[in-house]
Image (cartoon, coloured by chain):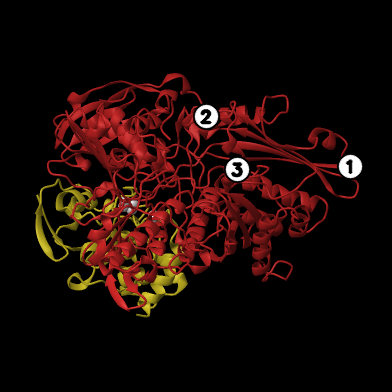
């Protein structure tokens, strides 16, 4: 997952492929669980395998390859390892291996990427095996020492017991011997019903330092002799840097150097970032704004609007029956056009990275959602081979998809390369961050529904028009030009399937890619797809005088898991019973990232323009719930992110650039606007769904449907800010 | 050169008088618990106490802070122990990414000094920090818990 253009795209695969060439390794599947030579952690404690290090004092160090950006994955993954390891949870600590170490060890830790709510669900099996394998080896080591069969020994809480004799020892005492054993060929994982740590809302492992200011984020790193850089990229995407007049700023306090970065950016390097930024603001710069300098939100909207017309080419994402014939022969037809804007991620910590480059080494320190992609970017920008580079991952002050990209890493290395031997920290100002994002893609959607004379829904036509993320970031993942991700929540089956059965269905996407770079965003396509589908479901229900919940239920009989979460929120919000005076309800359901989600909102509206969201009930079925306390927090947090996008978000384009610059014109919800969120976590087992993103998409349509219930008016355009509707 | 008193210690800091206090604290003094989020007094990530009052340090110049008692997250707890707000934060597992939380905790500590038992409405009015992770539900619960500690 790298930046814009084609050639960069296969670089990560190339780097990883080269580093492991000849190893015959099935990437991410055939992970080594120990070996003949004992590998030691920096402090000398032995590894049982790549995931588990145990110190003589019984401390358990669990290696976490995925990134922690607030979503709790670090704690959840540690729970999964600890569960199988049967270790004392109070003695667990974690550390991040580096991508360089992983590549050097034939990708011992598998995939580092942390996006698409995949952190736990796509690594749960092998990390559990890592824990189970280590447990078997520790027990075997104790059994060898006691000269008894391992089958007579058990382990719990880091203590091994020989049941017949009652002898005990601890993991720390047998770890040296265990590390020398051959790993078992196969291990059996626990039945989920026997879980003791997984499934419990245990406290996060990273909280304490986050309350005292001790946690080191990328922005906080300090290296001896380090200098600081501030950067300005051409404000028009696709434009170039023509020239800059460094003489005007070289005499300013603290300034060391002014450098060109790529062909589109300029950076000032100074003793402090404040000096660098002050000089950058004073630096005269001439841009070649390129071919996109006239593009505006209006021109983009017009182009997308044209894509709604059936005469235009479109990719089919899901289809059954004959929608066009059914609509032509319908007794009644309902049609509506919706849209959803660009959104910046606005992670609380702006983009930054630190690099130290010398002619034979390049090291980077940064927050990243994809350690291996950051590593690949380091190789490419430094020009050095894999064994001469590494990336040290730090905590992320938010990710939301933005830190899956590596533009800021590449920039930092390119600056550091111009000052060999000096560590350089590059920090983007909030303004730079706001104007050089990889934005939630922009779309419009024409929804058409048809009924027969008995008010049965006979056809549903969903015609999306707009931007594809894969086209820009991962064109190799397009399927004959089609972006499958564009259909999140509207697919016939799979991890993002539509929850309704309609006799004639057509879901299609007229792909239109404006020059504004798109990126993965919390939930990405489910945000708008859920608004389009779920608000329109309400419109359809209303058009035939049916209750929105009952109308949905009739179409959901073949989708029991979708229906179960919908029923759960309906019951808890009190659907069908009177709401408090002046309070109105809305409901929505969707599926994304392998999880079934539903939401029901209670709102009141003043003067038609001031919305108070009193309550949102949310339900999710993620298959397994590793840490319900963290899932609750992800649900509530996702609503803050999603409702912020609905009410305040929206990045607009003028003269080819993003108009928003900071939180004064790209506002974010505050505590006084926060509804009470009541979560229902209902894991039904048998599959692993995501947690960080799926729920985000139901808050918007639930609130919009409640707004219709309150006012009789449909809102089909996001953000509400542009319609002078705001939080009460 | 400016003479600043931070967390009870007096320090000579080599900065221009108009430098925002945030950057003097982070870069010149080296206390990085105080965060940069916007630089225009919108987000609250940079909140510190100046003479006991919560202030957004990106909007305060060093010259305005001279001669005042500045407290950062690193100096909030008495003698290195945890402040009751920090304790409530840990008990309620409030932080997600945690980046906004230094500022959030400083704002809450100042609120509790002024209003030891704040109502929900007091919280709504006083706590205007941005948290992109959306920890507000836990923030509110933890404030009430700290108030009752
Ligand atoms: S950095 Fe000071 S309020 Fe945002
Ligand atoms: S905890 Fe991440 S911004 Fe508040």
Does the beta carbon at disc 1 come under 8 Å from ligand 2?
no
Instruction: Please tell me which residue is depicted at 40% across the width and 35% down the height of the picture.
Output: A436
Mark 2 nearby-residue class (10 Å; few <14, some 14–19, many ≥20): many
Q: Secondary structure at mark 1?
A: loop
Q: Quadrant location of residue A502?
A: top right
What percent of the width, then of the height, locates residue A319?
73, 37
What percent of the width, then of the height, locates residue A267?
26, 31
Q: Residue tagged by mark 1? A: A331
Instruction: Please tell me which residue is depicted at 54% across the width and 28% down the height of the picture.
Output: A513
Badge count: 3
Which chain contains the residue that carries disc 1?
Answer: A
Residue A337 higher or lower than B62, as above or below:
above
Q: Quadrant of the N terminus of chain A?
A: top left
Which chain contains the residue that carries disc 3?
Answer: A
Mark 1 nearby-residue class (10 Å; few <14, some 14–19, many ≥20): some
Chain coloured red here: A
Ligand 2's quadrant is bottom left
User: Label 2 to label 1, Cα distance in Å?
Assistant: 39 Å
User: Label 3 to label 1, Cα distance in Å?
Assistant: 30 Å
Instruction: Please tell me which residue is depicted at 80% across the width and 43% down the height of the picture.
Output: A503
Q: Are marks 2 and 1 on the same chain?
A: yes
Q: Quadrant location of residue A208?
A: bottom left
- Mark 3 or 1: in front is 3
Mark 2 or 1, nearer chain start = 1
Mark 3 nearby-residue class (10 Å; few <14, some 14–19, many ≥20): many
């Amino acid at each position: 997952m790298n930046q814009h253009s084609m050639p960069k795209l296969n670089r990560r695969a190339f780097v990883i492929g080269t580093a492991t060439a000849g190893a015959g390794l099935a990437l991410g599947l055939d992970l080594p669980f120990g070996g003949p030579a004992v590998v030691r952690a920096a402090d000398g404690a032995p590894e049982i395998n790549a995931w588990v290090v145990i110190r003589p004092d019984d401390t358990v160090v669990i290696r976490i390859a995925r990134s922690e950006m607030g979503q709790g994955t670090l704690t959840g993954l540690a729970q999964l390892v600890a569960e199988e390891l049967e270790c004392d949870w109070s003695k667990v600590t974690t550390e991040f291996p580096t991508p360089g170490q992983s590549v050097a060890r034939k990708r011992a830790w598998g995939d580092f990427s942390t996006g698409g709510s995949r952190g736990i669900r796509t690594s749960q099996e092998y990390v559990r095996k890592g824990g189970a394998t280590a447990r078997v080896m520790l027990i075997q080591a104790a059994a060898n020492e006691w000269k008894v069969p391992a089958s007579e020994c058990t382990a719990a809480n880091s203590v091994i017991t020989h049941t017949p004799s009652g002898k005990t020892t601890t993991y720390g005492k047998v770890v040296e011997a265990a590390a020398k054993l051959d790993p078992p060929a196969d291990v059996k994982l626990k039945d989920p019903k026997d879980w003791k740590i997984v499934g419990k809302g245990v406290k996060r492992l990273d909280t304490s330092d986050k309350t005292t200011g001790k946690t080191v984020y990328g922005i906080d790193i300090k290296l001896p002799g380090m200098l600081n850089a501030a950067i300005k990229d051409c404000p028009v995407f696709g434009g170039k840097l023509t020239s800059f007049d460094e003489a005007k700023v070289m005499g300013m306090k603290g300034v060391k150097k002014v450098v060109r970065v790529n062909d589109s950016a300029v950076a000032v390097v100074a003793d402090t970032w404040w000096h660098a930024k002050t000089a950058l603001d004073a630096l005269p710069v001439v841009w070649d704004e390129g071919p996109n300098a006239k593009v505006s939100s209006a021109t983009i909207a017009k182009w997308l609007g044209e894509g709604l017309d059936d005469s235009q080419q479109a990719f089919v994402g899901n289809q059954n029956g004959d929608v066009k014939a059914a609509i032509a022969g319908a007794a009644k037809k309902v049609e509506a056009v919706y849209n959803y804007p660009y959104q910046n991620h606005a992670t609380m910590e702006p983009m930054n990275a630190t690099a130290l480059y010398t002619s034979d080494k390049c090291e980077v320190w940064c927050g990243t959602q994809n350690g291996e992609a950051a590593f690949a970017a380091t190789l490419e920008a430094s020009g050095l081979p894999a064994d001469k580079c590494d990336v040290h991952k730090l905590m992320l002050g938010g990710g939301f998809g933005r830190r899956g990209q590596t533009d800021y890493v590449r920039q930092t290395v390119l600056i550091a390369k111009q000052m060999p031997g000096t560590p350089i920290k590059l920090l983007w100002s909030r303004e730079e961050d706001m104007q050089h994002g990889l934005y939630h893609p922009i779309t419009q959607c024409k929804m058409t529904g048809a009924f027969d004379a008995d008010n049965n829904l006979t056809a549903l036509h969903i015609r999306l028009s707009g931007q594809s993320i894969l086209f820009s970031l991962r064109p190799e993942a397009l399927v004959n030009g089609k972006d499958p991700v564009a259909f999140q929540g509207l697919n016939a089956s799979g991890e993002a399937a539509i929850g309704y059965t309609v006799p004639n269905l057509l879901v299609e996407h007229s792909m239109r890619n404006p020059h504004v770079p798109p990126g993965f965003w919390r939930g990405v396509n489910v945000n708008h797809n859920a608004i389009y589908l779920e608000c329109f479901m309400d419109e359809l229900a209303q058009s035939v005088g049916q209750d929105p919940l009952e109308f949905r239920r009739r179409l959901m009989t073949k989708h029991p898991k979708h229906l179960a979460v919908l029923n759960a929120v309906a019951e808890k919000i009190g659907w069908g019973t009177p709401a408090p005076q002046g309070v109105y309800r809305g409901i929505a359901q969707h599926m994304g990232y392998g999880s079934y989600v539903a939401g029901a909102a209670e709102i009141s509206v003043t003067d038609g323009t001031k919305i108070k969201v009193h309550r949102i009930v949310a339900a999710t079925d993620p298959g397994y719930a590793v840490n319900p306390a963290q899932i609750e927090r992800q649900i509530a947090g996702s609503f803050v992110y999603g409702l912020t996008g609905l009410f305040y978000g929206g990045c607009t384009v003028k003269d080819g650039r993003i108009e928003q610059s900071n939180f004064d014109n790209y506002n974010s919800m505050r505590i006084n606007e926060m509804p009470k969120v009541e979560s229902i976590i209902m894991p039904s087992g048998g599959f692993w769904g995501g947690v960080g993103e799926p729920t985000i998409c139901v808050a918007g349509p639930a609130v919009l449907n409640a707004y219709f219930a309150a006012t009789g008016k449909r809102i089909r355009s996001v953000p509400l800010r542009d319609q002078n509707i705001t939080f009460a | 050169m400016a003479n600043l008193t931070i967390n009870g210690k007096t320090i000579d800091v080599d900065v221009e008088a108009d430098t925002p206090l945030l950057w003097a604290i982070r870069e010149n003094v080296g206390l990085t618990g105080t965060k940069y989020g916007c630089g225009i007094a919108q987000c609250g990530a940079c909140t510190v106490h100046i003479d006991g009052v919560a202030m957004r340090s990106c909007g305060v110049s060093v010259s305005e802070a001279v001669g005042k008692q500045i407290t950062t997250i690193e100096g909030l707890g008495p003698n290195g122990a945890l402040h009751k707000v920090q304790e409530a934060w840990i008990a309620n597992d409030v932080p997600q990414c945690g980046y906004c939380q230094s500022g959030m905790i400083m704002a809450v500590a100042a609120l509790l000094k002024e209003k030891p038992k704040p109502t929900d409405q007091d919280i709504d009015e006083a706590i205007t920090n941005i948290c992109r992770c959306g920890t507000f539900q836990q923030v509110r619960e933890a404030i009430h818990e700290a108030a009752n500690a």
